Amino acid sequence: MNLVLEEDKLNKLEGLLSKLIKEGGASYTLLTDMAGNLICKNGEGPLDATSLAVLAAADFAATKEIARLIGEEEFSLLFHRGQKENIHFTRISPEILLIVLFKPYVSLGLLRLKVESIKKEIQRLLEE
């Protein structure tokens, strides 16, 4: 994939990730390509975003192969629940992945609604 983003578009993407934190209850958000290259991120606290981006992309790719093995084309989202942090992955486009970290007390339903809304905004922005 060859994605080139101008500073203005990158700032808008970062703003959308910030919006997901404010409105959806996320604690950290990352936008990455399917190879694990970090595009942008938003959130507070000590987090190795580069490693998380690479591992998340690999996790999503492995899950895509699992889907294929059971007769699905792919799973469009992936979710892992932890005691301190949950992680939600969703494919924005064939080459872009949104990774969202959120606390266990945050409603998964509300988060998914906000992710869907932000996903559409990101898709529109990337198509410009």
Image (cartoon, rainbow, N blue to C red):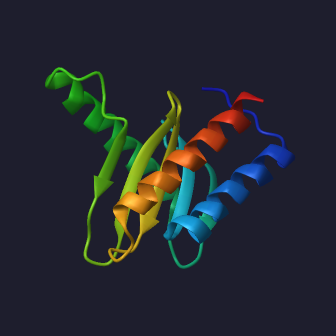
Image coordinates of residue 93 in percent, x first then y, are 53, 31
* Residue at (43, 44) in percent of width and height: 90
In the rendered image, which quarter is residue 66 located in? Answer: top left
Q: Is residue 52 above or below residue 59?
A: below
Q: In which quadrant of the rendered image does the C terminus lie?
A: top right
Residue 91 lies left or right of residue 19; in this view the side is: left
Residue 68 lies left or right of residue 46; in this view the side is: left
Q: In which quadrant of the rendered image does the N terminus lie?
A: top right
* Residue at (27, 37) in percent of width and height: 63
* Residue at (32, 74) in percent of width and height: 104
Of 85 and 113, nearer the camera is 113
Number of marks drawn: 0
Image coordinates of residue 79 in percent, x first then y, are 31, 53
* Residue at (52, 77) in percent of width and height: 46
Residue 37 visible from this viewpoint: no
Residue 125 visible from this viewpoint: yes
Q: Is residue 52 above or below residue 122?
A: below
Residue 95 lies left or right of residue 60; in this view the side is: right
Query: Outermost residue, left direction?
Result: 70
Image coordinates of residue 53 in percent, x first then y, are 48, 52
In the rendered image, which quarter is residue 105 located in? Answer: bottom left
Image coordinates of residue 6 in percent, x first then y, are 83, 41
